[in-house]
Amino acid sequence: MAAGELVDDLLPEALAVACEAFWRVSRHRCSPDELWAGIALHGRCVLEIHDHAAAVAIAVYLGALEDRSVHVMTGDGAPRTTDVCSFLGLTVATLTQDLDDEERRAAYGADVTVGPPIQFGYDYLTDNRVSGPGGRVQRDLRRAIVTEADQVLLVSTQLTLLVNDKVVASIALAEYLRMYPHLAGVTATVATEAGRIAHGYGLPVEATTAQKRPDRRDHPDLIYATTDSKLQALVEATAGYHAAGRPVLIRVDAPSTVAHLRELLAAQGLTATSLHPERPLAHAGRPGAVTLLSEHVQDRQVILGGDLDWLAEEEVLASGLDPVATISATWVDALAAARRRLLPAWADDRQRVIDAGGLAVLGAECLESGWLEARTRELAGSRGDTRFFLSLDENWIPSRSRFNGVVKSSPDPITGWLATKALGRMKRRFHRNVVDLRCRGFDYASVGSAFRERFYAGRRRLIEGRDPLAVVIAMIGPRQATELEAMAVGPVGSAMREQVRSDARLIVDEEWARCLRDLRSLYNGYWDEGLPADSLAAYQQELEVRFEAMRRDVRERLLNHLLDLEAELPNRETIRRDWYYTREGGLEPGPPSANVDPRETLPSSVR
């Protein structure tokens, strides 16, 4: 690489080094599929693969050789990837919330920076709120690899930075990710959303050949005439699985349906497991457990027998030990001891669940996309049963297609080739409509992002530029430019310019916060209308009008403020006479008078 060779020229050697390092660190030999996956990630794509550790480690190593700046966005710290990279001599840093600015800047200076996606986005927002030169911590964005890419790329989290209870910076996570020239991701379920990924990020979706789950039984949907008959059938199925000692996970979104299901389950003598906010599925894999899941979770699959680490932590907490007040070593020893005590019983519970047939995952309604459905089924892992219970009175089925009067009184599922084919077609149309809406959301967000970047670029010129007064003059136009330039020349110029930088920053941020609220209200109005494709141009024009209105307000406030600042200067004529002389082109620097102390001609706020 030092001789100018490209990574592609050294690909066989680089792969050999990465694979050998992965073997020495984790005692795992990389398969041909994993080698191909690592190369694919290095070349920009979203990869569908279940065990992605080797592929990510290979791609990060290749990327670090080329760019020396790779961001690994993950929720678990990617321990095997970081260990391999450290073994290979790369500098690796992990982002945490408790880092100060210098530590954070050093972390972004490493070859490989690891952290949760939201932290990278938050740091980007913070960088666009710095108050002076040298305040930013991120380097230029180059290369990012995202684990759990389906959740990160498709669930576009809105980040918001609050300062003194006013919104001053916000960005959708998807918009931030699209700033990376080289973006790639890995996940276990994303193939159904290839269109959205391509539309939103310009990335192809690839899949390895080792993706099949042969032992899991994904049953076709059961469709009923009414919600009542659907839920009654779902509860009966749950009772059957529970009687066999199998855990059951029920995915349901509507709060009213959750309450109704709890009542129906109670009538059968079944109690739904309470979800812990930190680990909602910790008990979902225990024998006979019934779990109602009404939120999106990061867990890829339920641990059969229960989450042993969390069960051990619950036992230690129940003993009265406080993790905050307890010495770290004492807490770790207590967790290890509890884990050893629980291990035999946990192993027996796990084997009971496996012998009974594994986890049963049931859906109580149609989810909005094929990806969500696939991810829900994936919670059962490599074994178990999955099935969705649907009804004709759900909102996704057009009213004219609900077979009114034909099957209304039947408690049994709808059968027949023609009916199931028609309902399958409607379900695909519903998913397609949702995908189209999300794609239009990408388009609308791209328009808003362009204006946001225009603002941030101008703000960076003001905050980080060597001559903030020149930036301000460019903002307000040529009017009064000569007088404003005259204010900041001479021995007092540096202090005056920094005062201008500070005051202008406050004005710009206040106006941007006001504009941001206005833009969000405008977007919400278009959202309520379904983000119509033929209104995108009108939306862009309205953004332009409001953005220009903000710039006009900034110009007026800046000019008035600077003129007020000039008016505070005593002996204004003395300053001009002693420091400048007149030519046709205006005022230019001249020799200072020996009788005037320039420090005495400044307001107290600038001295």
Image (tube, helix red, strand yellow):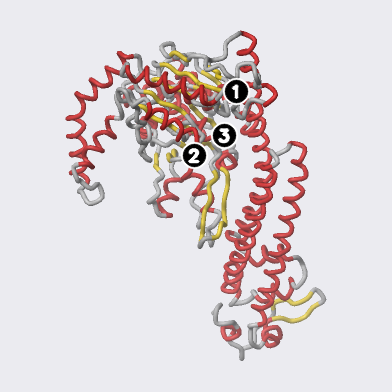
Identify residue type, mark 1.
Leu
Res 439 quadrant in image: top right
Badge 1: residue crowd in 10 Å (few <14, some 14–19, many ≥20): many
For the residue labelled by badge 1, is the local secondary structure a helix, a strand or a loop?
A: loop
- Disc 3 designates what residue? 182
Residue 337's spot in the image, x, y percent?
Answer: 17, 34
Question: Is 519 rendered above or below residue 605?
Answer: above
For the residue labelled by badge 2, is the local secondary structure a helix, a strand or a loop?
A: loop
Question: Is 542 rendered above or below residue 415?
Answer: below
Return the disc, 3 or 2, that comes first in the chain's sequence: 2
For the residue labelled by badge 3, is the local secondary structure a helix, a strand or a loop?
A: strand
Spatial CA distance of label 3 from label 2 is 11 Å
Question: Is 143 rendered above or below residue 231?
Answer: below
- Disc 1 designates what residue? 392
Residue 520's spot in the image, x, y percent?
Answer: 64, 50
Residue 302 vs residue 12, the one in the foreground: 302
Is 111 positioned to the left or the right of 288 in the image?
right
* Residue located 37% across and 51% down the image: 98
Residue 368 vs residue 175, the one in the foreground: 368
Residue 265 vs residue 63, the one in the foreground: 265
The reply to whether callout 1 and callout 3 are in contact (CB within 8 Å) is: no
Identify residue type, mark 3.
His
Question: Is 46 rendered above or below residue 36?
Answer: below
Is 606 positioned to the left or the right of 32 in the image?
right
- Disc 2 designates what residue? 69
